[in-house]
Amino acid sequence: MSTSSHLLLVALLSSVSALASGDDGVAPREWIEPATGHRVVRLSDEPGSASLYFHQNAYTAKGDKLLISTPGGLSTVDLASRRLEPIVTGRVSQVVVGPRTRRVFYMKDGTVYATDLDTRATRAIVARPELRSGSGLTVNADETLLAGSYVEGGGASPSASVTPPTEPPSSNPLAQPPPQESRLEARWAERLPMALYTIDVKTGAVKTIHRGGGDWLNHVQFSPTDPARLMFCHEGPWHKVDRIWTIRTDGSGRRLMHARKIDMEIAGHEFWSHDGKTVWYDLQTPKSQEFWLAGVAVDGERAVRYGIAREHWSVHFNVSPDGRLFAGDGGGPRSVAAPGNGQWIYLFTPTTTGLEVERLVDLSKHDYRLEPNVTFTPDGKWIVFRSNMHGASHVYAVEVARAAGPQK
């Protein structure tokens, strides 16, 4: 999925059932997955709730709260008591939780805001409606800067260009279906003038740091440890773009992190390791044939590749806080891997011979037009994801440790 399918959380789901599969009954609150023996809990209360996109931080630094999107706005989940508390009301976009203070940053009606997750005290940082046309927000490690991309000169929003008209709208801003490949290519071919920007959190000053020259700039992510380093991508058909880049916040040091070497090679859905030393991504050599979870060092040329079987390929991968485990959200029958029995939440453990794979949650009744977007909780004990496996979209968590043996 390109960030364009989630960039504007304001493009909202009015019909959750359109993305739903399976029963339309009430989703269970907790169960032991029969096929795997892992405990699964539902964290959200309202149908139509969703977790954030997989690379957007949703956790407080203390690790006690998770931010989710609900039909009414944004709420926190206390990860110990599982109690929900509304934080922001109304339609918002470009949401990210700060890594140091207990603030959530977001855009609403063309203004960038910061809201305290405990007191709900809210401050307007800057009003710049044109920033809605791109992707972000992302916040740096010391919470002094926000960053993102935008279309210069008041051009059309990328997400408006790629959202398939055949897909029904969804009631939750985070649960937009990914663009059809033909629409993705059409948006890429528009060559809209885009730029990367930073926002000074204290003063609201906006600074353009890089112009794309027609490249579609997307998936903007600050390093979790280096306050002056950004990652971004050249969005579009993956086999036609050199996708993954890093850059300094002063515009210097732009570096291509993965160069395609063969015809139809693709790399994408990039994300940071928690120590900021590695960029991880989905690599296919070539597309739909050979699959890897690949990583490249931010400093130097060190690279690693873990082979992935077709059925274990995932729309998105993610890494645990200690870097010892990976998670994947599987793939539907219409995905690039066409994985067959690949609709699972997966746990991957690196070994000396590759990745040891464990299935955690059966997503055979999940409609992958809603991408699960796995993330690890800060203590590494749970994997959070969103799913419509029981009808409407909800936020769930599966325990990494097995609670019981799988049923035979």
Image: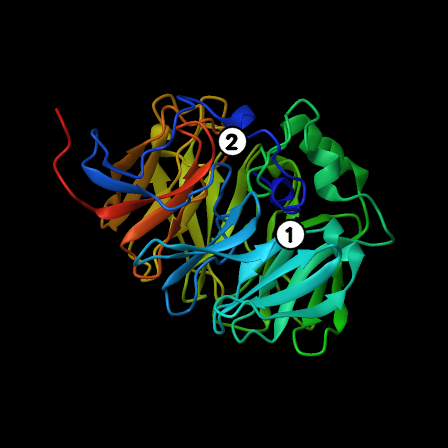
Callout in the foreground (2, 1):
1
Residue with the mark numbered 1: 92
- The N terminus: image quadrant: top right
> Measured along the vertical axis of the image, is residue 162 above or below residue 61?
above
Q: Quadrant of residue 273?
A: bottom left
- Pick whichever, 122 or 164, lies toward us: 122
Of callouts 2 and 1, the N-terminal one: 1
Q: Nearer the viewer, residue 287 or 122?
A: 122
As helix, strand or loop, the secondary structure at mark 1 comes to loop
Residue 107 locus on image (x, y percent):
67, 57
The location of residue 353, given as percent across then percent down, is 23, 45
Determine crowd level at label 2: few under 14, some 14-19, many 20+ residues with C-alpha closer than 10 A: some
Quarter occupied by the C terminus? top left
Q: Is residue 212 visible?
A: no
Measuring 73% from the left and 42% from the top, which residue is drawn there? 158
Q: Which mark is residue 330?
A: none
Q: Amino acid at mark 1?
A: Val
Residue type beneath disc 2: Lys
The answer for how far apart the CA atoms under marks 2 and 1 are is 35 Å
Disc number placed over residue 287 in the picture, else none: 2
Instruction: Give the residue drawn at x 36%, y 32%.
Output: 27
Image check: 272 left or right of 156? left
Q: Quadrant of residue 186?
A: top right
Name the foreground residue: 388 vs 347: 388
Q: Residue 360's x, y, as percent?
A: 27, 38
Count of numbered badges drawn on the protein: 2
Can residue 239 be spotted in the picture? yes
Q: Secondary structure at mark 2?
A: loop
Give left or right: position of 131 versus 286. right
